[in-house]
Each structure stands twice: as C-alpha cells, then as structure tokens.
Image (cartoon, rainbow, N blue to C red):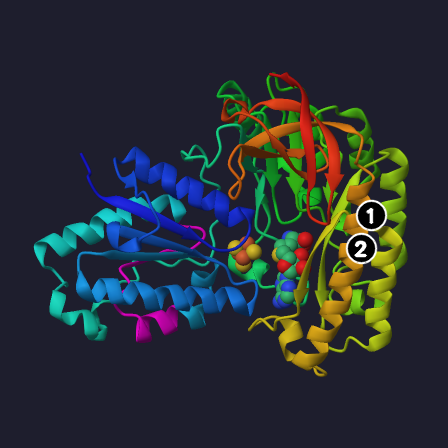
Amino acid sequence: MNSRSYKIITFGCQMNEHDSEVISGMLTQRGYTEAAGEDMRNTDIVIINTCSIRENADKRFFGTLGQLKKIKLANPNFTVCVCGCMMQQEHITKKLRQSYPWVDVIFGTHNIHEFPDMLEEMFQRRSTGEDWTVNQIRSSREFRVDRVYRDSDRIVEGLPAKRLFGHKSFVNIMYGCNNFCTYCIVPYTRGREKSRRPEDIIAEVKALAADGVKEVTLLGQNVNSYRGVSADSGNEWDFADLIYALNEVEGLERIRFMTSHPKDLSDKLIAAFAECDKLCNYIHLPVQAGSSSVLRRMNRKYTREQYLELVRKLREAVPGIAISTDIIVGFPGETEEDFCETLSLAEEIQYDSAFTFLYSPRRGTPAADYENQIPEDVKHERFNRLVEVMNRGSKARNAAFVGRVCRVLVDGPDKKSSGILNGRTEEFKLVDFEGPEELIGSMVDVEITASNTFSLQGRIVSEQE
Ligand code: SAH
Ligand code: SF4
Ligand code: F3S
C-alpha cells in the first residue's frame, strides 16, 4: 500500500479544477492519500496545476514555487510536481529547467493520464540513486522533464475523478479551442477543439446521478461548438441535442454549462432553455467589449448589435434568465469612446454578475504585439468605472429577488458564520440562510428576505429531497 500523501494547488478555470479532480482520483486509486490541512510541509507530494491566462496567474505560480523550494531544501524527499497550461508554453519549461531544477515532475495538459506512472518512475529512480543525489538539488542536474507533449488526437476516457462535492460535478464535454481570440493563450495551451462522444458523456452523467449528483456543469471553452459523433449511429450531435438527452437523465436535477461563445449561440439552444426543465435559467455569455471595433480586433466574430440581439432573444424566450459575462478592459487600442461603449452596453443589459479583467499581454498571442498598448493607470481607471456600473447592475438584479421563494441546492456551511448554510438558486445566485448541516447536498425552498451586490439572504420555507 502506498503511504504517501499529496496536495494539489489549482490555479485557473473549471477545466483545471476538473483536471485536478482527475489527478486526485488517479492518485487515490493508486493508494495515495490527500493531505489534510494547509501546511505544505506536512505532505509528501505537492502538485501545482497552473494557468496561463493572465500575468497574475504566472506570478502566483512562481511565488508558490519559491515557498516550496524552502521545504525541498530542508527535506529532499519532498516531491514537487507541476502541470497545467503553463507547461505547454516553451519559455516556461525552459525557465523551469534553468532556474527551478529541483522540480521533480512536469507534465502537460494532454498527459494527465500518464502522471501516476511518471511519479512512480521518478520514485523508482530516486530509490535506486540513479540520476538522483540529494546534494545535487542546487545544481541544475536534478531537473526531470519526463514528458511534455504538445498535442494529441486521443481523448482518454474512463479516468477516475475524486469530486470536490458529492452533490454536484463538472463534466467535460469537449477539450481545446479553435477560436483564437487575439488576446487569449488557451488555444495554444489546450490545443484544438475535440468533442467527446455523446454516449460517453451521457454514461458519465447517468453514473454521477446514480451516485447522488444533482447538478452537472458541462465544460468546454465554447460548448456551443460541441460536435460529438455518436458511436452508435455515426451521426453528429450538436450542443442542444446533448442538452435534450441529458435532460432525460433520471435523478439529475440541474444542468449548467460553461462557456458559451456568443458567435455560436443557436436558436435551438435558446429553445432548449425554454423546453428543458433541468437546464438552469442562467447563462454565462462573455461579451469582452462593447465596441464593435474592439470586438473585431479581438477576433470575436460578433458585433455589439448582434450581442444585444442575442440577449434580447434569450430574455424573450426565457423570462427571468440570469446573465453573467466576462469583460476585458484596456485591450490594445481601446479608446475612451470604445470604453464608453462597454459601459453603455453594461448599463443597458444589467448583468447579474460579471468577471472584469485588466488586459494582460500574453506572449505568443497576436494582441501582445499590437501597437497602442494601454498604460496601466488608464486601464485601472477604466476598470474602476466599469466595476461600479457592473455592481450597480448586480445589486438591482439581486434586489428583484426579495420576496420570492427560490429552490436552492445547498452547497455547504458558510465559511464565516456558524449555523449558516449557503447554496445557489437556479440563476446561480448565492444565498445564505440558517439551517442544519444535514441539508447539505439537498434542495430546499428559501424565501429571499434581503439582497446585496454579490449575494442574497433568506430563510427556509420547506425542505425537499
Ligand atoms: N473560453 C472562454 C474563456 C476562457 S478564459 C470564453 O471564450 O468565454 C476566461 C476569461 O479570461 C475570458 O473570457 C477573458 O475575459 C479573460 N481573458 C482571457 N485572456 C485574457 C488576457 N490576455 N487578458 C485579460 N483577460 C483575459
Ligand atoms: Fe480564449 Fe476565445 Fe477560446 Fe475563449 S473562445 S478560450 S477567449 S480563444
Ligand atoms: Fe487558465 Fe488554462 Fe483555464 S490558461 S483559464 S487554466 S484553460
């Protein structure tokens, strides 16, 4: 029996979170145990799953490595593994080779399934002394890039996942991205779009539902371009076909998805919102900018007007649908007029919530080389103005919930106050309410009694399974 403990530190999006669940599942299957507590000195193996999306994510990764180095120097058996999107960037692995030679295992986003074997091979070599001596930690000979692959055509099915929650789960429906938005690194780190077979997805969701999962979030960089080829018929399924099929899964109560690219949002999917009772009244629809000329330079392939029209259609077909978005401030060449168009679009739509980002040049993407990069102080000033408008919108949308009774899937105890639980409404609104911990994982009806910018408060009016 393997007695080593591990801890995974995850940066980035739901893709990475789910990859970490898979890594955890594979290690658990091999007998490793997840380390309890926060102190990394008490664990044998630390795995950092990295993100390349913005500069901040890079900085946090190297900051964490700095902390781990101290532990490694005190205890050479301490094992450090790194993976995720940053490993797909050559300048990063080069930097690791040169300046972080004590990192034990590096693996890419297409090699996750190979990690447990790589780890064991490394332990094997370490135990035989081959290519490993403690004293070499400071020299650069200890570096071990076992395998870093660029891409692969296969989708590896059937990997175990150790889920963070018993009652909800992520399900990958596709990998990669073909869109090449000019600011974005993801197509370079995750490779080309590949859709899973519908039968594999349905079987996974059925198994999850049988295991008590009430809510699934279907993951893809652009789920709207899902094209899964059926193993049975050879027919191609689109995303709406998949939703209709999953809506029939017994025991499953809620379906969510991320992310939906506006350019590919079909009328068929809008109809599915109205017809599929399990599909939640919520859509994350990243707009990125309110100016058509910025959108064109971002290679988003829709205009401001087309986006507004989509929102109008969604709201007409699905009254009360909650809409959230992502916006980038300070894209190269963004003028004050362009930015004001983002502000006015946000005012007009009144989003339920939004992630707002300062543009961050990513090496290797076209926009990083564009002229007219926006000075940091201008970006920050615009960012603050945008956040103010966004918050006003969220506050007003949340206020409209007061007095309503909402079904809430209870996620867990509140981190700050004891006796308080929180969960999400169908619209993805966070709700705090009093209740016993036995309710975690179940659906309850909550009357909304108060609201603020980022959450609602309520009281339970009835409990149901
Ligand atoms: N596939 C998803 C987005 C994944 S990245 C989609 O297309 O919506 C999540 C968000 O990070 C993006 O929507 C974008 O708003 C932001 N982002 C991506 N690259 C960025 C960059 N270089 N600088 C700032 N924000 C960025
Ligand atoms: Fe990045 Fe655009 Fe692909 Fe989203 S759709 S992952 S923003 S390239
Ligand atoms: Fe980051 Fe990779 Fe996700 S770059 S946002 S972890 S796909």
Circle number at residue 109: none
Of the residues shown, which amino acid type is indicated by label 1? Ala
Residue 178 sits in quarter: bottom right
Residue 63's x, y, as percent? 40, 68
Taking the spot 90% from the left edge, 49% from the top edge, the residue there is 309
Residue 213's x, y, as percent? 54, 25
458 or 319, nearer to the observer: 458
Taking the spot 73% from the left edge, 50% from the top edge, the residue there is 453
Q: Is residue 35 above or below residue 280?
A: below
Taking the spot 32% from the left edge, 42% from the top edge, the residue there is 36
Point out the stretch of residues depicted in magenta.
93-111
Taking the spot 38% from the left edge, 73% from the top edge, the residue there is 95
Residue 80 is covered by the magenta coloring: no
Per the image, the residue denoted by label 1 is 396
Label 1 Cα crowd, 10 Å radius (few <14 / some 14-19 / many 20+): some
Per the image, the residue denoted by label 2 is 392
Disc 2 secondary structure class: helix
- The answer to whether the residue labelled 1 contacts the one labelled 2, judged by CB atoms less than 8 Å apart, is yes
